[in-house]
Amino acid sequence: AERDGSNEYSDYQPGSLNTTDRLIEDLKNIDIVFHIGDISYANGYISQWDQFTAQVEPIASTVPYMIASGNHERDWPNTGSFYDTTDSGGECGVLAETMFYVPA
């Protein structure tokens, strides 16, 4: 969710700000963050990735931040993804794997 209220998805993920704020407040007690699936819900909109990476930057720049792609990062028909849906908006895992390097 955007802090300034300008959200093209009409209040799509308002709880994400509360979650990241609590993580930032407690960073001294956190060794690593595992973000498993549905990373930014960008669904093919690069602006959502830009907003999301800015939102998690205080966390990811302080402790290791490891992701695993979910359907909203990977799924697209005929790409070898588990489900044959258009959930990724055509991203097909490329952005998630490019922005957050994790070992194979």
Image (cartoon, rainbow, N blue to C red):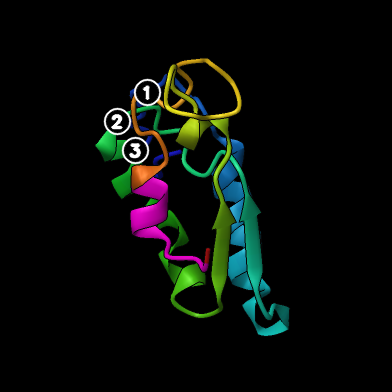
N-term-proximal mark, 2 vs 1: 2
Q: Are marks 2 and 1 in contact (CB under 8 Å)?
A: yes
| Res 42 quadrant in image | top left
Q: Three-letter amino acid code at disc 2?
A: Tyr
| Res 46 quadrant in image | top left
Q: Three-letter amino acid code at disc 1?
A: Gly
Q: Can the viewer see residue 54?
A: no
Q: Are marks 3 and 2 in contact (CB under 8 Å)?
A: yes
N-term-proximal mark, 1 vs 3: 3
According to the picture, the residue beneath numbered tag 1 turns out to be 89
**Mark closer to the observer (2, 1):** 1
Q: Secondary structure at mark 2?
A: loop
**Mark closer to the observer (1, 3):** 1
Residue at x 40%, y 44% (from the top left corner):
3
| Res 53 quadrant in image | bottom left
**Could you say which disc has been placed on residue 48 in the image?**
3
Q: Can the viewer see residue 29?
A: yes
Q: Three-letter amino acid code at disc 3?
A: Gln
Q: What's the CA distance linking mark 2 and mark 1? A: 8 Å
Indicate whether residue 26 is drawn in magenta.
no
**Could you say which disc has been placed on residue 45 in the image?**
2
